């Protein structure tokens, strides 16, 4: 669980469910993430390759995450070839976004 120490204490998801949620995001990003950028200090932009069922694979965890971890604001922008996912936080949670960006960058498909 030590690699989940970055998960903020304000997250209301039961601790035993954290690894499952992180694994779900990791799998999605490993399979579909094509690029990421940091257009603003408190916003991370992820582009995921579109395809059958991918939009739902993005929407479902976004809905669950929004329900338990109010520190994130998600904006999902479906497109023909890419699905954009913006993740924003308030200034108090910038380090969480930094860690998420670093963790996610390793999953970009080249």
Image (tube, helix red, strand yellow):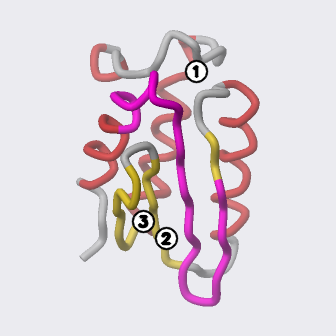
The residue at 60%/81% (across/down) is: 51
The residue at 29%/22% (across/down) is: 3
Residue 72 point in image, percent of width and height: 59, 36
What number is the disc on residue 48? 2
Residue 75 point in image, percent of width and height: 65, 57
Q: Are marks 2 and 3 in contact (CB under 8 Å)?
A: no
| Mark 1, residue position | 17
Q: Helix or strand or loop: what does disc 1 sit on?
A: helix
Task: Please tell me how crowded label 2 is: few (under 14), some (14-19), or many (20+) other residues with Cα within 10 Å.
Answer: many
Residue 70 point in image, percent of width and height: 67, 27
Q: Are marks 1 and 2 in contact (CB under 8 Å)?
A: no
Q: Residue 85's quadrant in the figure?
A: bottom right
Write the start and end of the magenta stretch as one range: 75-97
Q: Residue 97's quadrant in the figure?
A: top left
Closer to the chain start, of discs 2 and 3, is 3
Question: Which residue is the extreme one toward the bottom?
Answer: 80
Compared across the picture, whether 70 is left or right of 18 comes to: right
Q: Is residue 82 magenta?
A: yes
The residue at 45%/60% (across/down) is: 45
Nearer to me, 42 or 33: 42
The residue at 46%/70% (across/down) is: 47
Q: Helix or strand or loop: what does disc 2 sit on?
A: strand
Q: CA distance from mark 2 to mark 3?
A: 9 Å
Q: CA distance from mark 3 to mark 1?
A: 22 Å
What number is the disc on residue 31? 3
| Residue 62, placed above or below residue 47 | above
């Amino acid at each position: 669980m030590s690699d989940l120490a970055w998960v903020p204490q304000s997250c209301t998801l039961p601790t035993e469910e954290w690894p499952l949620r992180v694994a779900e995001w990791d799998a999605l990003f490993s399979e579909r993430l094509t690029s990421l950028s940091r257009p603003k200090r408190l916003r991370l932009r992820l582009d995921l390759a579109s395809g059958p069922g991918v939009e739902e694979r993005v929407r479902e965890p976004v809905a669950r995450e929004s329900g338990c971890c109010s520190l994130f604001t998600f904006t999902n922008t479906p497109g023909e070839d890419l699905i954009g996912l913006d993740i924003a936080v308030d200034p108090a949670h910038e380090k969480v976004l930094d860690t998420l960006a670093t963790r996610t960058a390793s999953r970009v498909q080249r």
